[in-house]
Image: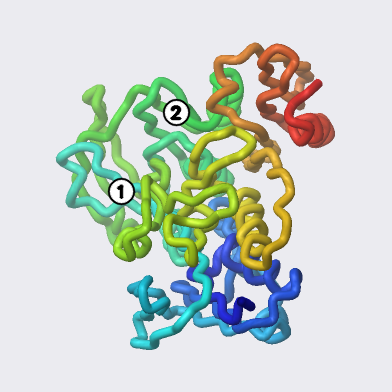
Amino acid sequence: MTLQSVVVIGAGHAGVTCAATLRRLGYTGTLTLLDAQPETPYQRPQLSKAMLVGAEEPTLLPLRPPAFFDGNSLTWCPGDPAIHIDVRARRVHLASGKVLGYGKLVMATGSQPRKWTSGAGCSSYSALSLSTASDSRALRGALQNAAHLTVVGGGFIGLEVAAAARSLGVSVSVIERSHRILSRVASPAFAERVATLHRENGVDIRCNAEVVSITSIPAPKNPLRATMRLSCGEECVTDVCLAGIGSVARDSLAKDAGLVCEDGIVVDSRQVSSEPDILAIGDCARSFSARYQRYTRWESVQAAQEQARIAAMTLCCHPIPAPEAPWFWSDQFGIKMQMAGWLPAAVAAPQRCTVTSDSFSLKHFDGQKLLAVESWNDVSGHMDARMILTRDGAV
């Protein structure tokens, strides 16, 4: 039976890429893109970088030009989030009261910042988080009048914000409860190089530390000012506090609909969920990786776009190519950092590294098989390693 209607919930990188790919593959049925955000779908990487600096607020970079939404027979519904899915009736209920039927449903609801619950004395203080354009604008505004920023969590997003804040002349402290920064996403050697870069640029990194209490002391130009007490007993004053302790899948809509969820909507290698007519892609999906033979929740633009293309191929009954090795990038203090492969499996693996004063690629091997690569201002070396990873790591 010919597919006649597809509804995509979410208009981030995954949702928009899926819609575009469906049209490129020849799908001619109705196509609806539901968007909880009011703005035209925009690029997310800029939120922790370019959006925070400069005399004038940068314009959001669109995911697609406006003509995309008119020229693809696409119904885009901004600012009207889905609130309920009736699986049996194949209907999606929106906040506005509208009800949409679907033949196939694609969930691209993304993720949301993990709630900061560290310390009983922190519950009454609202730390900033960073996920949307409005979050980025709020953080930008707070930094304009700030002398000091505290970032709770030593992950990539928090470190990118730390770098942006230092470029504005704001002093920065990073509080990380683990023994090192980037403990879940980078090797110890690479993480130490990142930590050194930040310290060289004036960032105070505190590992094995937690914020145990915060007392708000708002000032006229700094309503977020507070006194923080650390687990070591030290107290400090901060003008802005950003909680950057990771994210959780935005999967409550799927759970309420009865889909199997385990920190994300569980899907197979074709992005199909436990309900055959519903697919999930991007940060909200816990996808089975044929390459690594395991379920995992990838959190990157590359993964979101690749899963979106796979979902579109699944819906259009197209053959699905071998998956690309996952990759990710970050810019901090003018350094381009690029990671590719399966880092958790590679952290304890033997390493090979050719280092110069300003660029290197750290490669992790299992025998003669390349597992992952972490690059520092080494674009050509990184791309060479990615080509090897595409061949399943055979050197």
321 or 128: which is nearer to us? 321
Q: Do the residues under discs 2 and 1 have CB atoms within 8 angstroms? A: no
Looking at the picture, does residue 179 appear above or below residue 216? above
> From the viewer's perspective, is 180 left or right of 260?
right
Q: Secondary structure at mark 2?
A: strand
> Circle 1: is it few (<14), some (14-19), or many (20+) Cα within 10 Å?
some
Quickly name the residue at label 1: 115
Q: Residue 169, can we see it?
A: no
Quickly name the residue at label 2: 205
| Quarter that holds the N terminus | bottom right
Q: Name the spot of residue 53 as percent of width and height, x first.
A: 58, 55
Looking at the picture, does residue 93 appear above or below residue 167? below
Residue type at the position of mark 1:
Lys
198 or 178: which is nearer to us? 178
Residue at figure coordinates x 37%, y 58% from the top left: 259
Residue at figure coordinates x 46%, y 40% from the top left: 171
